[in-house]
Image (spheres, grey):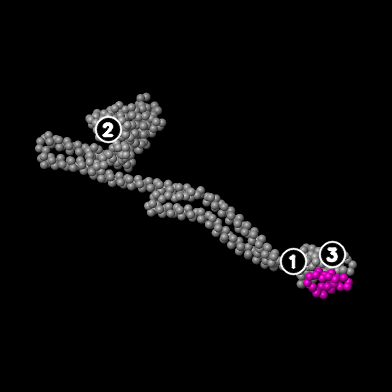
């Protein structure tokens, strides 16, 4: 049950229960008043209508007793008169000219009332402050007398009883409201307090560093989305911490790798410069050879620093990025035309690319060329053949361009493919050949592809070599009439 529904039920019960309790308390007070303060006989003696009915019943039973022809009938009539007198606490007397013939109830001697009734001719009602006498003629020479105590319900007595009843009702109502509030508070608060305690425990676990802690809460109420959001927050926080730890580890590896990779060419430069200074290179040919090696090592360091600077800028998303509609086939052809000869000298032959003519992506040309350059550099560096070969192909699949760069190099062990685009990965755990590259090329490819809204992956070709797969969203410019061929 949801908390909203519980509150609704609680509010309704907070009205209904005290109202029902007030009605029950009023009924109880009236019952107590009726049974103790105002018994039925006092009520009947105090109310004229009831008193008249009592006297009529007594007259009827008296006539029945006088007219009875058998002892059984007289006995039945007398019994009925006796019950009536006892029930209403009155005295009923039947008298004839000779005197009293039947009296039921407590005997009452009130000569003054008898004389006053006789003065009225034996019929009527006379009373004093405590007793009242009613007389009625029943046939020839017989008289009915009914003595009853005088009962008066004064206004003051009624007010007093009313105040007492209201006081008792108020006390009972306050007590019932208190109990109702306690019960309904537990009914609502308990279902709020328990989830809050669960959330508090979850927050405490996260605070103490237990990011794998999850809240198990399946009740269909308002706290369920909160607990699900808490679990999602914990999952994201765990991923963030793990990512931060990986990035920290990468930074440490970056520093270690930079130190290692820079130290090697620096050591070589230092050694050859010392050779020049010490006169080891004592001929012009040796000096030129030493200087060529120093120049090569300096260029390696320059390339390494450039790559590192570019990767850092991409990692911080501070590298300028100017996306535009880029026609892939033409951009690739222009790049190959400008660099094919350089790669041929490095032992890499680039086959004519097979790319869809009318396919455009939204990208920065500098980023796209950087991707192609780093992939071709990677194939040139790690190829084992005297002349390696690279094939570029692509096709569109819906709104995605799938661009493949294949080579016939040695490939990568299957278990190391997921690490291929990590920073400084070279498939060489000893890292004893820094001259083969900085290890940042494929990491830059991954960063650039992600910045362009795409992705990169790698697999080994069945016939040998490595295939790098790039996927980019196709731009709306694919069917644009601004295509240069139009």
In the image, residue 110 above or below residue 208:
below
Nearest the eye: 363 or 56:
56
- The location of residue 367, given as percent across then percent down, is 32, 35
Whole-number angstrom distance, CA of label 3 to CA of label 2: 136 Å
Whether the magenta-drawn stretch holds residue 99 is answered as yes
Nearest the eye: 51 or 89:
89
- List the residue tagged with mark 3: 73
Taking the spot 36% from the left edge, 48% from the top edge, the residue there is 241
Quadrant showing the C terminus: top left
Q: Quadrant of residue 390?
A: top left
- List the residue tagged with mark 2: 409
Whether the magenta-drawn stretch holds residue 163 is answered as no
- The location of residue 239, given as percent across then percent down, is 37, 46
If you read the primary sequence from the N terminus, does the residue marked by circle 3 or circle 1 appear first?
1
Whole-number angstrom distance, CA of label 3 to CA of label 1: 27 Å
Q: Quadrant of residue 324?
A: top left
Q: Secondary structure at mark 1?
A: helix
If you read the primary sequence from the N terminus, does the residue marked by circle 1 or circle 2 appear first?
1
Taking the spot 45% from the left edge, 52% from the top edge, the residue there is 199
Tell me which segment is drawn in magenta: 92-118
Q: Quadrant of residue 95?
A: bottom right
If you read the primary sequence from the N terminus, does the residue marked by circle 3 or circle 2 appear first?
3
Apparent side of residue 11 relative to residue 389 in the rendered image (left or right): right
């Amino acid at each position: 049950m949801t908390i909203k529904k519980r509150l609704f039920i609680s509010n309704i019960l907070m009205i209904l229960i005290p109202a029902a309790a007030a009605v029950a308390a009023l009924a109880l007070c009236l019952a107590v008043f009726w049974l103790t303060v105002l018994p039925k006989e006092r009520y009947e003696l105090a109310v004229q209508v009831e008193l008249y009915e009592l006297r009529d019943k007594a007259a009827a039973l008296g006539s029945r007793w006088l007219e009875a022809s058998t002892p059984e009938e007289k006995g039945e009539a007398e019994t009925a008169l006796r019950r009536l007198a006892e029930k209403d606490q009155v005295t009923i007397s039947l008298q004839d000219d000779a005197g009293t013939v039947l009296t039921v109830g407590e005997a009452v001697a009130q000569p003054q009332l008898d004389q006053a009734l006789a003065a009225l001719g034996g019929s009527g009602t006379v009373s004093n402050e405590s007793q009242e006498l009613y007389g009625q003629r029943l046939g020839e020479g017989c008289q009915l007398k009914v003595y009853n105590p005088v009962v008066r319900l004064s206004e003051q007595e009624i007010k007093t009883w009313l105040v007492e009843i209201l006081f008792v009702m108020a006390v009972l109502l306050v007590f019932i409201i208190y109990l109702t509030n306690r019960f309904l508070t537990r009914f609502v608060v308990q279902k709020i307090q328990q989830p809050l305690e669960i959330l508090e425990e979850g927050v405490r676990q996260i605070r103490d560093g237990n990011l794998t802690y999850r809240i198990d809460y399946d009740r269909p109420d308002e706290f369920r989305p909160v607990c699900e959001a808490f679990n999602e927050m914990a999952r994201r926080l765990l991923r963030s911490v793990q990512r931060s730890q990986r990035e920290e580890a990468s930074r440490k590896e970056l520093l270690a790798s930079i130190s290692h990779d820079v130290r090697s060419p620096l050591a070589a430069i230092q050694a050859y410069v010392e050779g020049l200074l010490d006169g080891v290179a004592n001929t012009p040919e040796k000096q030129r050879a030493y200087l060529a090696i120093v120049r090569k090592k300096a260029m390696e360091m320059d390339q390494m620093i450039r790559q590192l600077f570019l990767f850092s800028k991409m990692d911080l998303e501070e590298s300028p990025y100017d996306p535009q509609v880029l026609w892939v086939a033409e951009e690739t052809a222009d790049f190959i035309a400008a660099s094919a000869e350089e790669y041929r000298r490095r032992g890499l032959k680039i086959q004519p690319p097979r790319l869809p003519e009318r396919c455009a992506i939204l990208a920065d040309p500098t980023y796209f060329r950087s991707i192609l350059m780093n992939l071709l550099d990677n194939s040139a560096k790690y190829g084992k053949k005297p002349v390696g070969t690279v094939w570029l192909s692509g096709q569109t699949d819906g709104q995605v361009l799938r661009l493949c760069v294949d080579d016939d190099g040695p490939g990568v062990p299957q278990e190391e493919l997921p690490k291929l685009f990590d920073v400084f990965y070279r498939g060489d755990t000893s890292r004893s050949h820094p001259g083969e590259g900085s290890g940042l090329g494929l990491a830059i490819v991954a960063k650039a592809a992600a910045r362009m809204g795409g992705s990169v992956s790698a697999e080994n070709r069945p016939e040998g070599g490595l295939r790098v797969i790039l996927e980019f969203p196709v731009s709306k410019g694919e069917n644009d009439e601004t295509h240069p061929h139009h």
